Amino acid sequence: MKTMIATFFLSLISCCAFAQDKAAIADAEAGCGPDNIELSVTTDESKHPAPTPENGKALIYVVQRATGTFKFGADGNWLGALKGGTYFYTSVEPGEHHLCVKGHLPLWKGLSLHGLKAKAGETHYFFIHLVSGGGYLELFFTEVDPDQGKELVARSKFSSSQPK
């Protein structure tokens, strides 16, 4: 009986693993940059920039409170990386953008995606957080209200990143 149950679960797992549509996954991850690019993160407690959007552009703030290091990308390029308790910002042209946050989590690939229709002069705030459930951590990348976003930025350290 135990052998039958074990065989059933192994069949179920292998079925689900092979049922993935790799082309659809690659299309969904279009906002991410190349997997082979690693970024190192540094924080600077002496700086705490909080700019407004450049003329004719939109501004995106990204805040992370979770532990670990996560890369942030838009439209197929990595724009920066963050580690726990940090934020950074980037300017984007008006229009539709595909955003991505990616990192490595135990027992689960850390990936979260978000579509954004940016308008000139707008400021968008995003929050990276982890939720535990079912024996694994799941990554969430959520746009938050500007008041909440300003508070998250104010309580975080400024981070910068560069390719390793």
Image (cartoon, rainbow, N blue to C red):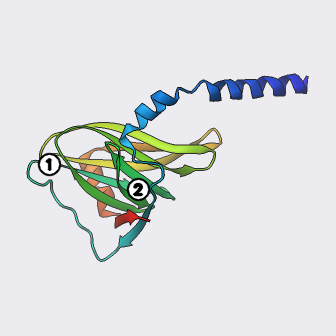
**Secondary structure of the residue carrying numbered label 1:** loop
Q: Residue furthest right?
A: 1
At 38% across and 38% down in the image, what residue appears?
Answer: 30
At 41% across and 50% down in the image, what residue appears?
Answer: 128
**Secondary structure of the residue carrying numbered label 2:** strand
Position above or below: 21 against 118: above
Disc nearer the start of the sequence (2/1): 1
Q: Residues within 10 Å of mark 1 (few under 14, many from 20)?
A: some
Residue 78 in the image, given as x and y percentages of width and height:
36, 52
The label shown at residue 64 is 2
**What type is the residue that disc 1 sits on?**
Lys
* Residue indicated by mark 1: 57
Tags 2 and 1 touching, CB below 8 Å:
no
Q: Nearer the viewer, residue 77 or 113?
A: 77
Position above or below: 152 against 20: below
Choose top left, top right, bottom left or bottom right for residue 98.
Answer: top left
